[in-house]
Image (spheres, coloured by chain):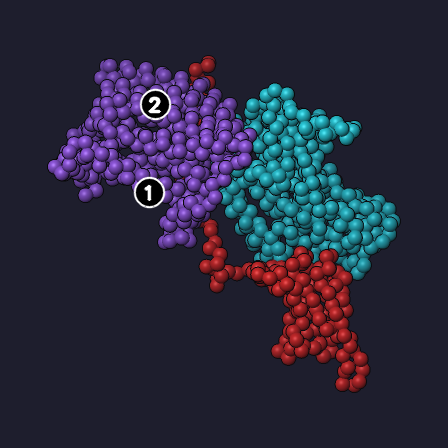
Amino acid sequence: MFLKDYISDVVNGVSSLLKGMRKTGYYFTHSKEIITEQYPDNRATLKLADRFKGEVVMPHDENNEHTCTGCTACELACPNGTIKIITKFDITPEGKKKKAIDAFIYRLEMCTLCNLCITACPSDAIKMLPNFEHSVFDRSKLTKILNKPGSKIKEGIE
Amino acid sequence: MLSLENITKTTQDWLLTKFSPTMALTIECVIVILLSITLFALLGLVLVLLERKVAARIQIRLGPNRVGPGGIFQTAADTLKLIMKEGLTPDKADKFLFNLAPFVVMMVAMLLLAPIAFAKNFQIWDINIGVLYISSISSLSVIGILMAGWASNNKYSLLGAMRSGAQIVSYELSAGFAVLTIVVLTGSLQISDIIASQENGWWLFKGHIPVIIAFVLYIIAVTAETNRAPFDLAEAESELTAGFHTEYSGMKFALFFLAEYINIFIVCAIGATLFLGGWMPLHIGHWESFNHIMDYIPSSLWFMGKTFFLIFVIMWFRWTFPRLRVDHLLNLEWKYLLPISLFNLLLVTVIAIMGWHF
Amino acid sequence: MYNQTEIIKDTTELGPEGELVINIGPQHPATHGVLHLVVTLNGETIKKIEPHLGYIHRSIEKMCESLTYRQFIYVTSRMDYLSSHINNTACALLIEKGLQIEVPERAKVVRTILNELTRIASHELWIGAMAMDLGAFTPFFYAFREREMITDIMEDTCGARLTMNYIVPGGLMYDIHPDFQTKVKAFVKQFKEKVTEYEDLVTGNIIFQSRTKGVGVLTAQDAISYGCTGPVARASGVSCDMRKIAPYDAYDRVEFDEVIETTGDSFARYIVRVKEMNQSIRIIEQLIDNIPEGEFVGKTKNVLKLAKGEFYQRVETARGELGIYIVSEGATTPYRIKFRSPGFSNLSVLNHIAKGSKIGDLMATMGTLDLVIPDIDR
């Protein structure tokens, strides 16, 4: 019957709307459901995943030594030329010439954080750091030299 | 102090002792203008903040919380920003109409403030055709919107304005019928009479189911009339970017924005007056002691409480429902709301004639 | 073919009486990216839709030709960024097929779980964006709350939230995080609780139903002839799930249903995606407790060289069938690479199904086609 259909239409429609309003009403009255993270305020407690790929760094030990041999495997693995390694020849105490890095240039602005350099490195000289606050006022600051000044390669790494 | 009851009377008496009647009237007018502008500014700030907070809570967010404690100065800061922004006029726009439109919309909203009773004996103009005045003035706001849409020389604006025109014209009807039910029950168009008739209980409770239906119809219709979601087709941002105010910026945009919130306040105030007794405290039949306690709460608080409750309901709608399509919107009005409100009016008339209401 | 004067004439000539041409996009709240639609209107009714592409063309296919087979995988994350994992899997599968690399079981299972998580994340985002297109803002936040759990899982295991680059030829880049299983289980539990919210807020809502039912109807015939795939075609009754037709990874050993609706309207497309999320949960539940122990990456040579010839691999992304076609000359880089992206075919059907409807319907139709613009343009 027409009238019956009409009334059931109205009732169904209104009840479906009320169902939705009940849901939003529930969230309005339950403040514990709020999921906002107040980012700059919670920096102290902010915990990033330990695997988070933020930027490439070269760890140095307490003697200012790293394990990079300058083999350029990372440079070759990088898909977009983020890494540039400039090598030099060190004279070892025995008087032999040894290849070492002069500068490990890393361009953060070009890096896609794909992790291919890390997997390519044979001596675990570089790693990813979970740091995401990269904003700087000068673009040139994003070009970094990863090996610290005066650092040298660790003994026994070939 | 909060009841504001005798303020108007005392002020008038004092003015009359000091000045001639004409002068007193002029001063009163100035005071009223200043007060209503202040009210507008305050309401704009409060309602925008309220909307953002309600939206945030519903959307499991915190909402504005940086400017001032709990973000209470956020809207003030936004207004400051809007004032300082450049008010652009598009190159090929109809400059006169383009600049006039926000003021027309704003003026309509201001005119509607006149017959609203904010508290006991605190009303700007207790005109004897109050309800009729409201119905007629509120339909003028469509002119401002059409003006804005046409003068912007923007296709989105034009589409938004046309939608808004169709929408406001049709929803006027059911809003009018919903208002008429109360007029039928009260037998008066005067706002103060309507409030006085609810002394022993609000119409929502006294008038059986037909008044409740009328109330629901009224809320739906005014949501549509004020272009609020789910009926915000005039500015449907996922369809028409910003609808009729796409081209507006700076303070001219702020006026549209403000007018939207003022309109909400006004329709909710009228809804509260007609169905929830305006400033009248909650009185239940012959529970004398209960009624007495209720009387202690100032009438202005009653009025504001009811109004803000209705505003909250309308905001709740906005943040729950998807938007209707333009033809569904008209279907809803002409196939559902209008027949129901006509039938409802008939029922109410029967109730009023037979005296079945409490 | 147009000759040049015709093109010039087309753009300068004013349309017939009553026609209104509006540009929806490239910057428009409803196009979710830089899609540009030139829409011819008659009042509110759409007469013609002409998508203009190229605003986000990065020539990924050409870029891939200069990258080695290990390197080019990361670029594919940038095509359909919402199912980047699945794109990466497709590349890895193709290389594995070309070089006959044995993939360890552990890697296969983990890949399948991650692919399904990606699919859920993509559909979650889509539900939110779709509801937003129709004017309901709140479901967006609820959907993102669940999606956030998935991105957290991805962050834990893969080290990134959107463009993971976790899949390498032969398996995975590194082993899964120790918390992986517990976190995925927690997500499955939460998802099952919260999925009813979408029913309340969106699916059952009368306004939503009236906005989507009977809107943008795509027949099975048209779906096939336009080359539609994924949920768009399945909503029209076309069975096209690559996970069923050509199972890869661990899909051959899990039980799940291919969701097929027959009405072909926007609501059917919506329902297909919602049901697909439940099927994905079903797949994850079957696999999460049965991740085999062992190696996570197979033995591969340091430098990968595909033999001379042509290779093709297709997978089911969240949007449909992604095909990767590589012509190899035997070098370390592909000679020619071509992606058959699902978004492009799904977009091409827009004019056909949205013609004659209202502007509001265009948003509903476009929303349910689930267009990701970088996937269309590449």
- Residue closest to the eye, A10 or C285: A10
Three-letter amino acid code at the position of disc 2: Ser
For the C terminus of chain B, the image quarter is top left
Question: Residue at 28% across / 16% down in the picture?
Answer: B349
Report the residue marked by disc 1: B42
Residue C45 visible in the shown view = yes
Three-letter amino acid code at the position of disc 1: Leu
- Residue closest to the eye, B53 or B73: B73
Which chain did the renderer colour red? A
Q: Position of residue A51 (x, y in %)?
A: 61, 60
Which chain did the renderer colour cyan? C
Q: Position of residue A127 (x, y in %)?
A: 66, 65
SS assignment at label 2: helix
Residue C197 visible in the shown view = no
Same-subunit check for callouts 2 and 1: yes
Report the residue marked by disc 2: B136
Chain B is shown in which shade?
A: purple
- Residue closest to the eye, A120 or C361: C361
Q: Position of residue C339 (x, y in %)?
A: 75, 43
Question: Residue at 57% across / 32% down in the picture?
Answer: C363
Q: Position of residue C152 (x, y in %)?
A: 56, 53
- Residue closest to the eye, C48 or B154: B154
Tell me which chain the residue with mark 1 is part of: B
Examine the image and state in which quarter residue C260 appears. Answer: top right
SS assignment at label 1: helix
Local crowd size for mark 1, using a 10 Å CA cut-off: few (<14), some (14–19), many (≥20): few
Q: Mark 2 and mark 1: span between their CA atoms?
A: 26 Å
Q: Is residue B339 left or right of residue B15?
A: right
Question: Residue at 38% across / 25% down in the picture?
Answer: B139
Question: Residue at 70% across / 77% down in the picture?
Answer: A152
Local crowd size for mark 2, using a 10 Å CA cut-off: few (<14), some (14–19), many (≥20): few
Against C299, is B251 above or below?
A: above
